[in-house]
Image (tube, coloured by chain):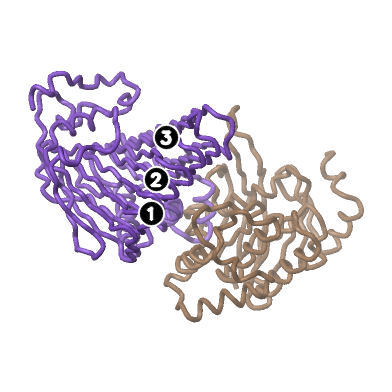
């Protein structure tokens, strides 16, 4: 049982006119096995929350804390955070020309597990995970995210989730750009990982569509850099009906 | 000999051809007061059937092409003996021909070699440049009709080496010339991989990679002279730079003459800056005298090591150092893979890794 604890997190980003505050004191606790949906309008800071926890250098932490089982996450380098058990499925996964998916996955698995996976079991493991995500086997020989369709990029993210087996996954707008079939395949992948482990999930989304496939235990409404309302799954139904208007006019 | 050099005018550095080159670091190669020693510096690692290796007098084996390069003009003046490597007519050599440098003594030397690929022959030649040298070097390729010649030139020189080199191919009707140039060693390397054609239906593919670290000057000046109809050329050079005062220069000149109808050419140069303090100059030039061509294009990009790539890889647990190595290996893999020799590919990649580790990039 692990706990990801975010307390009064404040984050700014450097602009031409100095620092602009984006997160204004975020409090959120996620325990193993829980799924928390973070919902909010565009520009509310949802992605900033995701990238700040993962350690993107663009964001400056100006206050608050993030701990994983009591250990200071913010003091860790980006790769250390991943090794500690955090995983960020990105909205816009980055192309890495010349680096094959195979090579990338094996290098990542070696780093996360602390030793190179045994080649025989590894090949089987990758094949099985790819088949489960309806991915063609030649996919492994392509360069990371290069020329991938939107759906392929998201499947590739979830493939990594399956293979790297983190304690907590942050899914940043994983539903964006997916058609219904791809959304179902990707969501099933997330549910499968959760079923096989005690994964805690922070599911960031603008729309309620993905919540039909990945059922949240808690829903948090995010606006102007912090959580403004919290509830159970029924809160998503309310947002579906009424939108974010009441949170943005304040 | 000295009477010949009296008319020689050393470059001042203002010439277009020399404006990027630090002339003070040439070890006397272009200095009119310095005599160059004629040397046959290329030797065969292993004899192969279908191949003839001989030393001939410079008078018996004059240069097959014209050059306006100062280093080449000067080297030719001093050369007394020429190395001649001949691939027999119709020979199909499945094994690569390995060449190495010998007779280098660290003094200013001049060396000239002619590589003749016989009619309808097929061969791969790999030249491994190692050691300590101050060398003005010329290699010409006579690529006979219907032949296919691949030449791999590996510059793995010691740190102090100065290498001014011309590698000029004359590609005949229906012949194919492939060049792969890899420059990782040396203090100052200035290479001129150049091509002209002597018959239609011919093609040239020039691939290259260079990796400059602290203080290295690595310069590649390509020239493809489309002087016949229906010839094809491809140029693809990739460079990486890391460390203080690492400098690379890539010049890609393509000239499509009025008679060169049906020309198909594309040249590309990409540079990856891995740290501050390094400088990559990249100048593609395309001059076209006829519009009746299949295609002509060029592209040049110079970019920094991408923070987003680094973040993506690191966020999967991959430490920054390994992430950088992955990206650089990936960047070069396309070129290195063309050598099609696992031992050399591994050696080059290991060297690139080691250079990266050394500069802490």
Distance (Cα) linking label 3 and label 2: 13 Å
If the image is split into quadrants, where does the N terminus of chain B sit? Answer: top left
Give B70 or A95, whichever is nearer the viewer.
B70
Q: Which residue is mark 3?
A: B225
Question: What x and y, as percent, mark residue A226?
Answer: 71, 47
Query: From the viewer's perspective, is the residue at label 3 or at label 2 nearer?
Result: 2
Query: Which of disc 2 and disc 3 is earlier in sequence?
Result: 2
In the rendered image, which quarter is residue B278 located in? Answer: top left
Chain designation of label 1: B
Q: Secondary structure at mark 2?
A: loop
**Disc 3 crowd, CA 10 A, few/some/many (<14, 14-19, 20+):** some
Question: What x and y, as percent, mark residue B56?
Answer: 14, 46
> Residue at point 57% right, 68% down?
A166
Give B224 or A239, whichever is nearer the viewer.
B224
- Marking on residue A244: none
Query: Among the chains, which one is purple?
Result: B
Chain designation of label 2: B
- Marking on residue B172: 2
């Amino acid at each position: 049982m692990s706990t990801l604890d975010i307390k009064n997190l404040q984050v700014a980003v450097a602009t031409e006119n100095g620092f602009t505050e984006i997160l204004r004191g975020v409090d959120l606790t996620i325990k193993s096995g829980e799924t928390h949906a973070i919902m909010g309008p565009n520009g509310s800071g949802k992605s900033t929350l995701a990238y700040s926890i993962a350690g993107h250098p663009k964001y400056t932490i100006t206050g608050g804390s993030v701990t994983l089982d009591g250990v200071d996450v913010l003091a860790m380098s980006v790769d250390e955070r991943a090794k500690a058990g955090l995983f960020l499925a990105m909205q816009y996964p980055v192309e890495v020309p010349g680096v094959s998916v195979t090579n990338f996955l094996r290098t990542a698995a070696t780093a996360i597990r602390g030793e190179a996976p045994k080649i025989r079991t590894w090949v089987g493991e990758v094949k099985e995970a790819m088949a489960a995500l309806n991915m063609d086997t030649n996919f492994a020989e392509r360069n990371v995210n290069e020329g991938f369709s939107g759906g392929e990029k998201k499947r590739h993210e979830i493939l990594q989730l399956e293979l790297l087996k983190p304690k907590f996954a942050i899914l940043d707008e994983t539903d964006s750009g997916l058609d219904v079939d791809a959304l179902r395949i990707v969501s099933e992948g997330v549910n499968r990982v959760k079923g096989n482990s005690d994964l805690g999930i922070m599911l960031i989304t603008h729309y309620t569509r993905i919540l039909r496939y990945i059922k949240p235990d808690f829903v948090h409404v995010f606006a102007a850099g912090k959580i403004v309302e919290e509830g159970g799954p029924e809160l998503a139904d309310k947002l579906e009906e009424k939108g974010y208007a009441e949170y943005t006019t304040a | 000999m000295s009477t010949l050099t009296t008319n020689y005018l050393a470059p001042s550095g203002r010439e277009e051809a020399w404006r990027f080159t630090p002339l003070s670091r040439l070890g006397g190669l272009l200095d009119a007061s310095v005599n160059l020693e004629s040397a046959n510096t290329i030797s065969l690692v292993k004899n192969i059937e279908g191949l003839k290796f001989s030393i001939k007098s410079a008078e018996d084996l004059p240069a097959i092409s014209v050059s306006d390069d100062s280093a080449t003009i000067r080297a030719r003046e001093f050369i007394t003996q020429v190395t001649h490597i001949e691939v027999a007519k119709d020979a199909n050599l499945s094994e690569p021909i390995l060449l190495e440098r010998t007779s280098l003594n660290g003094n200013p030397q001049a060396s000239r070699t002619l590589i003749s690929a016989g009619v309808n022959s097929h061969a791969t030649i790999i030249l491994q440049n190692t050691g300590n040298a101050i060398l003005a070097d010329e290699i010409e390729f006579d690529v006979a009709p219907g032949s296919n010649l691949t030449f791999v030139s590996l510059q793995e020189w010691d740190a102090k080496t100065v290498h001014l080199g011309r590698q000029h191919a004359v590609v005949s009707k229906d012949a194919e010339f492939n060049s792969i140039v890899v420059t990782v060693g040396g203090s100052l390397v200035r290479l001129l991989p150049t091509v002209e054609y002597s018959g239609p239906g011919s093609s040239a593919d020039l691939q290259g990679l260079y990796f400059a670290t602290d203080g290295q000057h690595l310069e590649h000046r390509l020239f493809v002279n489309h002087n016949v109809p229906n010839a094809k050329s491809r140029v693809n050079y990739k460079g990486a730079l890391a460390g203080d005062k690492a400098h690379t220069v890539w010049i890609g000149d393509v000239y499509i003459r009025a008679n060169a109808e049906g020309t198909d050419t594309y040249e590309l140069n990409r540079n990856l800056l891995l740290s501050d303090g390094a400088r990559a100059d990249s100048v593609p030039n395309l001059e076209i005298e006829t519009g009746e061509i299949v295609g002509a294009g060029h592209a040049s990009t110079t970019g920094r090591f991408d923070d987003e790539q680094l973040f993506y890889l690191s966020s999967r647990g991959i430490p920054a150092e390994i992430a950088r190595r992955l990206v650089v290996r990936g960047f070069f893999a396309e070129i290195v893979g063309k050598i099609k020799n696992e031992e050399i590919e591994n050696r080059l990649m290991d060297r690139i890794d080691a250079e990266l580790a050394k500069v802490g990039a």
